[in-house]
Amino acid sequence: MAQTVKAVVAPGRGRPVEVREIVVPDPGPGEVTVRVQACGVCHTDLHYRDGVINDNYPFLLGHEASGVVDQIGPGVTNVRPGDFVILNWRAVCGRCRPCRRGVPTACMDDFTAGQQMRLTTGEPLSAALGIGAMAELTLVHSGQATPVDPAVDPAVAGLLGCGMMSGLGASMNTGQVAPGDTVAVIGVGGVGSAAVAGARLAGATRIIAVDIDARKLDWAREFGATDVILADGSTDVVAGIRGLTDGLGADVVIDAAGQEETWRQAFYARSLGGTFVLVARPDSTMRLEMPLLDAFLRGGTYKTSWYGDCLPSRDFPALVDLHLQGRLPLDRFVTERIGLMDVEAAFAAMGRGDVLRSVVVLD
């Protein structure tokens, strides 16, 4: 029987979010319902609220979540009721060309629930990233639910569903940081700080954090940054990174800010033949103009990191285990724990740069 629960809904462009009652149907073939325990407040949710993604209002917000499987639909074999899971907005089909070639991180398929959740008025909801987890219960495709060790704090585990995985994966998967490497991360909010933590976990010996906000640089030090550069206009970021790397530039530079200027800084701050990783999503209006000869002469590798090039079934359990072993301080990303009614205030705190992550915690 369909269930009626409370959830955070974005009703229209420029309007504050609302806590509304929604109807969650029983899972159909290949679907599961998940009793949400925690959900992070991500920049992507703000983009949905403000119409940056599209105009398919009303949106059911939330995608960075963990919880317990409530019901499973016909044909579901990867999870069972009672399993503690992290929700992932990217699933793997096992059938498309990249999957058949052994590169599942480049899967071309799109797995989401076939049914829509609705307002009690009957209006269909667009679930953020196919998840919609700022709710007491949500409906997803079974491939979007990845079981992990239930000993982990749900507020911590959920963050791996998006931002933290993006940053950690940018270093460990996309950038392939190796022991002894020098790494620079430009922009150390939630994703950038996770990239710092990933670089440290991978064995980088020098990790340089760059940001315009001194508070974020202090946070980056907690996650493993050995050096910081305050990009307040008085410092040449490229020269600063080169000065800290014997004039060579960093082996891996990660742009977690996604601005035209930070792109140039990352490109020129890497070593000859080094790796440049773009993990931040640029605005659609941004354009670049630079000498093509520089791209030729500097060589190396340019990569875009999409969801940290993760494979959820592989990476989520491993990262949770590292956290439980005390080797990955995921708990430090949780700045505050809030309720469903506090999401609009959390967006404001995000805009001021006061938080790494606000996390909605549900009973």
Image: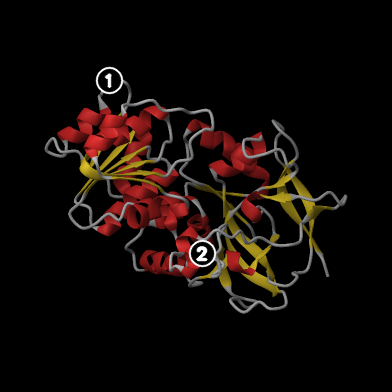
Front position in the image: 214 or 117: 117
Q: Percent x, y for residue 285?
A: 53, 28
Disc 1 designates what residue? 234
Does the image show residue 133? no
Label 1, residues with CA under 10 Å away: few <14, some 14-19, many ≥20 = few
**x 54%, y 70%: residue:** 94
Please name the amino acid that badge 2 sits on. Answer: Arg
The residue mark sitting in front, 2 or 1, is 2
Residue 335 at x, y percent in the picture: 47, 46
Q: Quadrant of the C terminus?
A: bottom right
Q: Is residue 38 above or below residue 261?
A: below
For marks 2 and 1, give the CA distance. Answer: 49 Å
Residue 294 against residue 85 in the figure, above or below: above
Do the numbered discs 2 and 1 sit on residues whose CB atoms are within 8 Å? no
- Residue bearing mark 2: 97
Nearest the eye: 281 or 94: 94
Find residue 284 and report its image quarter.
Answer: top right
